Image (cartoon, rainbow, N blue to C red):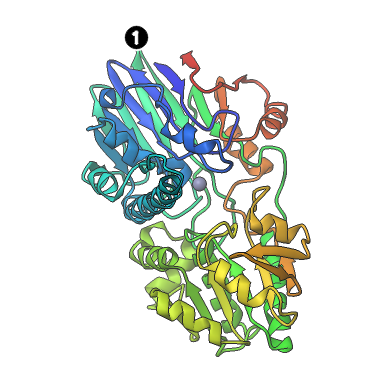
Amino acid sequence: MKLSFHGADRAVTGSCHLAEVHGLRILIDCGLFQGGREIDEENAADFGFDPADIDILLLTHAHLDHCGRIPLLVRRGFRGEIITTPATRELARVVLLDSAHLQEEEAERRSRKAHRRGQRGAAPLYGELDALNAMDLFGRKARYGVPLELSDGVRATFEDAGHILGSASIRLEYRDGGARRAVIFSGDLGNSGRPILRDPTSLAHAETVVMETTYGDRDHKPLAPSVQELYAAINETLERGGNAIIPTFALERAQELLYHLREGVEQGVLPRTLPVYLDSPMAISATEIFRHHPECYDAEAKALFDRGDDPFALPGLRFTRETAASMALNRITGGAVIMAGSGMCTGGRVRHHLRHHLWRQESSIIFVGFAAPGTLARILIDGAEHVRLFGDDIRVRAQRHTINGFSAHADRDELLAWHRAIQPEQTILVHGEEKAMQAFAGQLADTQVLMPRQGETIDL
Ligand SMILES: [Zn+2]
């Protein structure tokens, strides 16, 4: 088998790996590069292979940095089969359509600017039609633990990665002379002990592992004290008479927060009638999809579901899908929790809520996710006293809370334990900053460690 690497190499976004075996070309993920300005060019660049030559695309999960270039792949000639879990297929539909809209909006904005300067307009990376065409290529559905025959002697098995709903690690088995060999692609691995999802499945031996190293150099804070911190931050805000604004990612984090808030209400730690607004169309769709997939739940969430209880419902929860309903939230001056995207405050409705609340000392902004350098979330977390929003200078007087225990990624200890169970002869590290990767490599023993660069090929 020949492996080549086309994204998330010594970096965390743009996951894309190509396996070639017995004349079959199998792509594992096809993600968008994210962050920074030069990224647009990187996304529009050649894939490093001809999309028309790819037979099968195996998708580990629905995060944009793993599936976001699929419509472009289709636009450039890919006509093969896309295989993933049923939950990932549903989430990917929402994610890809949303991404296509954003691409089209962004291109339109740039074109207007260019036209004013007498220059030619910009075309979007891909549009809604490309995303819809991509959906037509989703074929067989993978069930956890059940091998799928890709061609004579090449089999793929999706195993639960415990990262987001439907997420998987993929074992690819093939013949090598008389022997059978296997390579495992970790996808993104989840953080054990979180609600709703099961912990990542511990996998049996494979000769080679291609694994993520996002948090290869550090361990997370525990979850339980973080949940208590969240409750305390909300209650303090209610006492002051303000609103608690939570910038949130639409997939997984929003649903986990709903789960924790419901528990808080049930335990009497939060007021029974606490109004909670989920102000994100994508998060609302994702929550509906979560309700369709109890087969992905852990024992506790499944027990709730079987009892007829909705793990994501609390008495005061309102969904605001329409823009008018979202704008009406501006009239609520206190006593509510408002969850809105984007998680890093780089766009989306949360920016409107920040405009209405950042200057009010009775309100609070609660950060519960990763914030990349340069994003508004990071600037606020770092203590900025003034920010510019919609052309206005805003004095920041709201209380700020940064709660770090909610990660959807395995930490160093969990990555090591997952790796140890497999005992691979060869370990290929991807999806991590170089510093995290080097630190993680230093912890591995009895395995050959490789850290490919983009475009590099490895013969197994
Ligand atoms: Zn992910």
For the residue pair 373 and 424, the one nearer the viewer reads as 373
For the residue pair 130 and 419, the one nearer the viewer reads as 130
Residue 194 appears at what percent x and percent y?
A: 57, 59
Residue 102 against residue 228 in the figure, above or below: above
Q: Which residue is mark 1?
A: 177
User: Farthest residue in the top direction?
Assistant: 177
Residue 297 appears at what percent x and percent y?
A: 44, 60
Residue 2 appears at what percent x and percent y?
A: 41, 16
Residue 98 against residue 410 in the figure, above or below: below
Q: Is residue 375 left or right of residue 297?
A: right
> Toward which corner of the image does residue 351 lie, by quadrant?
bottom right
Question: Residue at 67% across / 37% down in the picture?
Answer: 216
At label 1, which amino acid type do we have?
Gly
Tell me the element at label 1.
Answer: loop
Residue 427 appears at what percent x and percent y?
A: 57, 24
Q: Is residue 118 left or right of residue 90?
A: right
